[in-house]
Amino acid sequence: MTAPPPPPYDQTGAGAPPNNNLVWAILSTILCCLPLGILAIVKASQVNSLWAQGQYDAARKSADDARKWSVWGAVIGLVLGIVYLIVVIVVNGSSSS
């Protein structure tokens, strides 16, 4: 039985840098929840510089945090949008009666 092929490595032997999730952070900021999106952008912008400094675990944690805050921003934005839609429907329904 042969071993599976190793993951791609760069010159340092640490592997490929993690996805910084910057696109999702920006979309979350613009479309959903501004405060959490800004936090996600800050975390996403740290990933590449931490990786370049050799702080691989910190870079992975920042990438995970950027993803987490982007998802939370999207969920909160979606929930607030649904609540707003319900309020508008209730107000318009009660004003027409």
Image: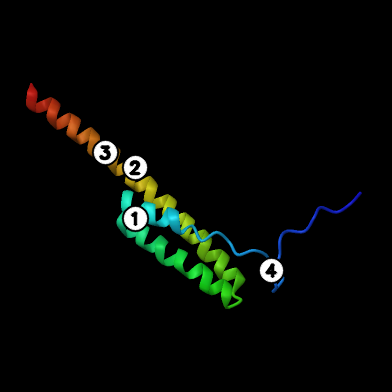
Q: Nearer the viewer, residue 8 or 69?
A: 8
Residue at the spot x=52%, y=62% of the render?
63
Name the residue carrying label 2. 78
Kindly tell me whether residue 32 is visible in this rendering.
no
Residue 92 placement (x, y as % from top left): 13, 29
Residue at the spot x=17%, y=30% of the render?
90
Q: Are marks 2 and 3 in contact (CB under 8 Å)?
A: no
Q: Are marks 2 and 1 in contact (CB under 8 Å)?
A: no
Residue 50 placement (x, y as % from top left): 54, 73
Name the residue carrying label 4. 10
Q: Residue 69: which quarter of the image?
A: bottom left
* Residue type beneath disc 1: Thr
Between marks 2 and 3 in the image, the one whose residue lies nearer the viewer: 2
Q: Are marks 3 and 1 in contact (CB under 8 Å)?
A: no
Name the residue carrying label 3. 83
Between marks 2 and 4 in the image, the one whose residue lies nearer the viewer: 4
Residue at the spot x=36%, y=57% of the render?
37
Q: Earlier in the sequence, mark 4 or mark 3?
A: 4
**Residue at the limit of the structure toward the front, as seen here:** 11
Give the Cα distance between marks 2 and 4.
Answer: 39 Å
Q: Nearer the viewer, residue 91 or 63?
A: 63
Q: Mark on residue 29? A: 1
Q: Secondary structure at mark 3?
A: helix
For label 2, count other residues whose C-alpha is less than 10 Å away and answer few (under 14), some (14-19) or many (20+): some
* Residue type beneath disc 2: Leu
Q: Earlier in the sequence, mark 2 or mark 4?
A: 4
